[in-house]
Amino acid sequence: MRMPTAETLVHVSGFSYLNNRDRLLDDLLDARNAAVALESSVRRLEYFPGDESELIDLLRGMDGKATTAQAGIGLVLATHWQDNRYTLTAAARTRFAGTFEYVASDEPKLRLAPVVAFIELAKLESRVRVSGYGVAEVALHRRMDEIVLPATRITLSVKHQEYSLYERDVPIQDYRESDLFKLGDYSRRFSRPNLSVASVTDVGDWRLGLAIENLVPDTLRGLQSTAYRIRPQATVQIGYQLMWGSANLYQDLNSQPAFGQVSERRETALKFDMPLGKRFVIGAGYQYVAKGRDDDAFSLSLSYRLPDSFYLGVSATAASRHEFGGAFRIQLPLF
């Protein structure tokens, strides 16, 4: 007798989001250029009283301004390696934040520039304080069919995690927009195992999901001894099938952890999807940030499906012209 073939699917997704609402990245570049120009004019004896005022005003105006960034990528391999209860995933995500700290003692140093006939950028103490963390993990998920509950599926996940904690103070003279959030030599790395559990219950047109990540808590410390606390994080999903499409609500029950300049984050996301014919689906969403530095945001999405498990989707998210991001999803049948 011929055994039925089992389809193997690969699903790749990614996202990124930048919050430059305070225009800190623009101001940092302006301040560095102004500092270099001032130093050059003093060294060439072309200085005029008041030339330092632009730089002083820029440094004062940036005090307390912040920028944040986050990104992630994921890979899901669904295959009948043992049987259809197992799924293998790999994922990585990062969160960064930078805050400018103005040091008032920089002002008299700049005012004295013509007296000492030069200024040294290395002596300016105003700086950007940058913190961030990255998490990469490989997980094996197993559907627990041994646990019998009405209309409910429970999945247990065993993970290997790699954490990178990044801390750095960036003086004006060292600022480069291209490497502000690069890990480089300013990170500390950790390896550890962990567990997660998730359940999905279908009742009529309703779907209720609960996921609890990182069941094994821990505390890690960065290069500046800042604590990063790994703790269980719970998310609820409520879905409803409408006549014209579907609606899904995602709710964080507790916050993502803070680390240095990276604040705690807790959000609620509401998304609507509506099919356009048999292959295209359009979507719209609203993201409410209950805790965190980012503003609430709207999103639009478009996806394309084929019957043989092919899927392609893209989305754009924006809160303002300086807070925006995007995401993609691709699913392919391998064999």
Image: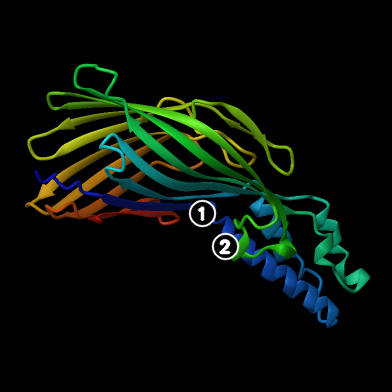
Which residue position is annotated with label 2?
26
- Measured as percent of width and height from the top left, residue 89 is found at 39, 44
- Residues under labels 2 and 1: Cα distance? 9 Å
Taking the spot 11% from the left edge, 52% from the top edge, the residue there is 307
Instruction: From the viewer's perspective, tell me whether residue 268 is left or right of residue 149.
Output: right
Quarter-wise, where is residue 213 in the image?
top left
Rate crowding at label 1 as few (under 14), some (14 to 19) or many (20 or more) other CA atoms within 10 Å.
many
Which residue position is annotated with label 1?
20
Residue 212 shows up from this direction: no
Whether the residues at callouts 2 and 1 have beta carbons within 8 Å, the answer is yes
Quarter occupied by the N terminus = top left
Label 2 sits on a secondary structure element that is: helix
Taking the spot 27% from the left edge, 37% from the top edge, the residue there is 83
Q: Of 122 and 307, which appears nearest the observer?
A: 307
- Measured as percent of width and height from the top left, residue 238 is found at 26, 28
Quarter-wise, where is residue 204 in the image?
top left
Q: Amino acid at mark 2?
A: Asp
Taking the spot 20% from the left edge, 48% from the top edge, the residue there is 7
Residue 252 in the image: above or below residue 260: above
Quarter occupied by the C terminus = bottom left
Sequence-first disc among 2 and 1: 1
Rate crowding at label 2 as few (under 14), some (14 to 19) or many (20 or more) other CA atoms within 10 Å.
few
Q: Of 50 and 328, which appears nearest the observer?
A: 328
Q: Amino acid at mark 1?
A: Asn
